[in-house]
Amino acid sequence: MEEIVNNNAEEKKKSLNFIEVIVEEDLKEGVVDKIQTRFPPEPNGYLHIGHAKAICMDFGLAKKYGGICNLRFDDTNPVKEDVEYVDSIMEDIQWLGFDWKNVFYASDYFPQLWDFAIRLIEEGKAYVDEQSAEVIAQQKGTPTQAGINSPYRDRPVAENLDLFRKMNEGVFEEGSMVLRAKIDMASSNMHFRDPIIYRIIKHPHHRTGNTWNVYPMYDFAHGQCDYFEGVTHSLCTLEFVVHRPLYDWFIDQLKTGDYRPHQYEFNRLNLNYTVMSKRKLLQLVKEGLVRGWDDPRMPTVSGLRRRGYTPESVRNFIDKIGYTKFDGIVDVALLEHSVREDLNTRATRVSAVLDPVKLVITNYPEGKTEELEAQNNPEDVSAGNHMVQFSRELYIEQDDFMEDAPKKYFRLTPGQEVRLKHAYIIKCTGCKRDQEGKVVEVYAEYDPTTRSGMENSGRKVKGTIHWVSCADAIDAEVRVYDRLFMVEDTSEDKDRDFREMMNPDSLKVLKGCKIEPFLKTAKPFDNFQFQRLGYFNVDPDSTKDNLVFNRTVPLKDSWSKIKNK
C-alpha cells in the first residue's frame, strides 16, 4: 500500500512543471505561508501570445495554490506608454479567463523608489555620472576585460544628493546625467558594473503628469516593487537569469527583515512564422502593414480573439507546450491544432459558398422548396439542429465542378454522382459557359429516393459537397487569413529586414460569398465551422446589411505539407 502511495506521489511530481515543484516545496517547508505573484507588463503595446504564457503562469499558479496575483503596470518610461495599452492589457487578461487581486503601477512606488535611491547615495552606494551613454558603455569593458571607473565615481555624497535633486527639478537636460549604483566595475557579471538606476526624461507621465523628471530603470524598480508588494515568487523569462544577482543585490540593500521575494525564470514562447518583438509589431501597425494591433494576422491576444481563437484554445496550447529552462521555437501548427480541437466541440456547422457558381437541378420541380434538417454539431448532440431550405437552384463552390476531371476527382463532373450535404444524390449532366469560357451554371439531376434520412439514402457515393439555396442565400464578405510571414525563423537572418519576409498572400478578401440565412443573426466573435472549408468567426466590422467573417483556421494544416515537400 505504501508503495502505491509513493508511486502516486511520484506521478504527481512528474506532472508538475519545475516552478510548481518549487512552490509546493516552499509551502511544505514553511518558506512561505501563502504564495503571491504578479504580472508586470509595460503599457507600451498590446499583449501577444508570449505574454499569454506568462499570464497563465502568474495567474494560474496563484489560483492553483490559493494565493493572489496582482496586475502591476511597469510604467517607468512615459515616452512609450499610453492609457490605451493599459485598457487593452486589462481586457486581454480577463478574456483569457483570469482576474487580479489588485491593480498596481510602478509609478505608485515612485516616492519609495526615490527615497531608496537617496539612501543608496547617502550610504555611498550610488553616484551621479555626467558622461554620455556611449562613454559609459565603453568604460564597462567586456565579459573578459574589467571596466574602468567613472571619473565621477567618488563624488562627495553631498554633491551627489544636490545633483540628483536638481535632475528631478528639471535643471539638467535629458542625457546629460544619470544616477548609477556603485557596485563593482571588475565584476564578471556585466550587470554589476555600476548599472544606471535613474535617467532624466522630460515627458508627461500618463498618471503622474509632470511631477517627475527622473525615472527609475527596470532593473532598479522591478525587484523593489516586488518587495513593496510582498511578492513571494517573481516569475520572469530566461533572459533575466543574468539580471537575478542584481535583483538580489538591490533587495539586500532594501530589506529590513527576513522576508524577500525570489526570482525564477522560465522559457519564453517563440513561434515559427511569427515575430514577437513589440518593437517590430509596433512597426507593422504604424507603417500600415497590418490593420492595427488587433489585425487577425497579428500574434497579439486581441488579434487572436478577433480571428476567432477562444480563450480555452490559447490556454490549452500553453498547457501543451509547458514551462522549461530551455528556449526553443514552437511550431505555430500546434497553436492552430489547439483551436481546431476546441472549436470542433463547440462550433455550429453551417454552409457557406465562398466562390459561388449556380447549380440547377433540372428534374427538381420549379417553385418547390423543402426544409431539411442540419445537425448543429455532430460532436455535441445537445446542440440540436437547424433547418435549411432546399430548392431547384443552389450555389456550390467553383472548385466542386470540373468538366474534364482527372481520374480521382470525386466531385461534380459530367456523368458522376455526388451527395449534396443533408439532401440528395445528384448526377452531373453538363454546364453552361459565358463568352469568356467561364462556367456560369452547372446542371444535374437528382434521385428523389436518396434524401438523407430516407430508407434508400444510404446508397454510397464517393463525394459529398456543400451548397446554399439561391432563393434565400445571404451575401457576405469573407476574409481568408494566412500566416503573416513566409520564413519559418524570422530571427535567423539578422541582416534581412523582417518586413521582406512577409507573406504577400496573408489576406484575401472575398466579396459576394453566399451563406445560409441561419447566420443572419450571428453576432461579432461567434464561431462557426463552414462545412468542408474551415473555422470562421464574425468580425466586428460586420453590420446588419453586411456580414463579415474571418477564417480562423482551415480544417487541416496545409503548411506542413508545403514545408515537407
Image (cartoon, helix red, strand yellow):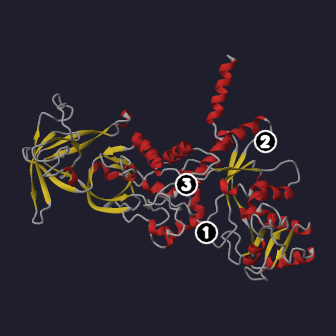
Please state which of the two labelled residues, at mark 2 or mark 3, is closer to the viewer.
3
Residue in the picture at 49% in, 55% down: 272
| Residue 212 visible | no
Quarter of the picture containing the N terminus is: top right
Residue 480 is left or right of residue 53, and the answer is left
Q: Name the residue that disc number 2 marks.
A: 32
Residue 181 coordinates in the image, percent (x, y): 83, 67
For marks 1 and 3, the one nearer the N-term is 1
Q: Name the residue that disc number 3 marks.
A: 270
Which secondary structure, mark 2?
Answer: loop
Residue 82 image label: 1
Residue in the picture at 52% in, 50% down: 330
Q: Nearer the viewer, residue 334 or 184?
A: 184
| Mark 2 surroundings: few (<14), some (14-19) or many (≥20) residues within 10 A | some
Residue in the picture at 93% in, 76% down: 156
Q: Is there CB contact under 8 Å for labels 1 and 3?
A: no
- Quarter-wise, where is residue 115 in the image? bottom right
Residue 220 is left or right of residue 160, and the answer is left
Residue 258 higher or lower than 449, as above or below: below
| Residue 529 visible | yes
Question: Disc 2 residue type?
Answer: Val
